[in-house]
Each structure stands twice: as C-alpha cells, then as structure tokens.
Image (cartoon, rainbow, N blue to C red):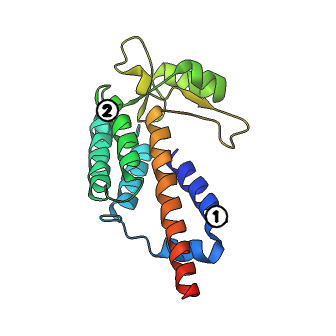
Amino acid sequence: MVYDGIVIGLVIGLIRAGWRSGIAALSQIRIKGGMIFPILLGIQLVLYFLHGKISFIEQYNGYMFMAVYVAGLYVLWLNRKEKGFWWIFAGVALNFLVMLVNGGKMPVSIEATASVLGPAYTQMLTDGTAVSKHIALSDSTILPFLGDIIPLTSPYPRSQVISIGDVVMNVGIFIYLQNVMLIHKLRASFVETN
C-alpha cells in the first residue's frame, strides 16, 4: 500500500507543482537515514522469497519483520520534523503494534479478502500458507480493528485489503510530497519575481 501513496502523491504533486518544478523538488529531498528504506525493502523481499524455502526464516520471520519495522520507525522518528512524517510514523506504528501483539504477522479479514482478492488467496489465508507476514483474522486476534480489514476494489486500480495504519501512513506520504513539491514551486516563483 505504501507504493500507492507515493504514486498518488507524486502524480498530484507533479500536476500541482508543474513537471519541471516537481522534478527539481524531488531532487532536493534529503531524508535523514533515507538509504535505510531501500535496504529494509530488500530485507522484506528476501524474507518473502525465502519463506518456505529456509526453515529458520519460516520459523522466525515474524521477529525479522518486527526488526525491520523497528528500524523503519527509527528513521521516521529521525525525520519527525518534516511535514507529514508524524502521520507516516503513526500509521507504521499502528501496523507494527497489531503485528507485534499477533506474533509478528498482520491479521487479514477473511471476509474482506474474499470480497476483493477471491477464493485462492482466501484459501491460502485460511490454510496458513499465505504470504509470510499475513495471518487470517480470527476470534483470538488481538486488536483486530488494526488489521487489514478495509477492502479496496474498482474503481481503485489495485484490488487489495488494507489497514487503518496503511490509510494514516498514506495520508502522511501525501502531505509530505505535496509540501516538498509545492514549497519548491513557491520558492522558484518567488526567485523569478525578484
């Protein structure tokens, strides 16, 4: 879901700020510890692809995902003064919290999944063979309202089930990108008029 917020924020930012000003603004982004994010993404992809192939990863992947979240929260905390980063931090923290109390896995609503993603993924959730960091939401789920319970479907371009934390995080990403791109446009127009 994080990619959706970035893409939507970029497209609207480029429309509002203009192509040249928007690209110039993006080239000026400096996030403290920002290179950690691609590394964390890489770690998540490795965990995803090796799940089921290496028993150690399968057994401890919940803890590994929690470590990735802690590192990500640390980087977000470093950048808390940037407009929108409190929202991003809060959204990631909500996702971290629900995963932490549920064994390192994100609870996913079977009903929402069935309505959006169809029977194959629903069966994988039910069987416990779903993607490594997801688990079916059940009566024993702690804080179920923070799990992936919100179905997104047409007219949204990607069918998926998201959490409240995802929504909050994406609001923050949108705010941050709009702020960066429009501030740069305002500065550029101020320089041109003087």
> Do we see residue 118 in this rendering?
no
The residue at which mark 2 appears reads as 97
Q: Position of residue 33 (x, y in %)?
A: 30, 64
Reply above or below: 140 against 187.
above
Q: Position of residue 65 (x, y in %)?
A: 33, 42
| Residue 185, picture quadrant | bottom right
In the image, what residue type sits under mark 1? Arg
Q: Position of residue 122 (x, y in %)?
A: 57, 23
In the image, what residue type sits under mark 2? Leu
Q: Which mark is residue 92?
A: none
Task: Give the crowd class for mark 2: few <14, some 14-19, many >=20 residues within 10 Å.
Answer: many
> What is the total number of numbered labels drawn onto the structure image?
2
Q: Position of residue 103 (x, y in %)?
A: 30, 27
Please state which of residues 135 and 56 is positioned toward the viewer in this rendering. 135
Where disc 1 sits, the SS reads helix
The quadrant of the rendering that contains the C terminus is: bottom right
Taking the image as shown, residue 64 lies to the left or right of residue 174, namely left
Q: Which mark is residue 16?
A: 1
Taking the image as shown, residue 61 lies to the left or right of residue 172, namely left
Reply above or below: 160 against 108.
below
Cα gap from disc 2 to disc 1, whole angstroms: 35 Å
Q: Earlier in the sequence, mark 2 or mark 1?
A: 1
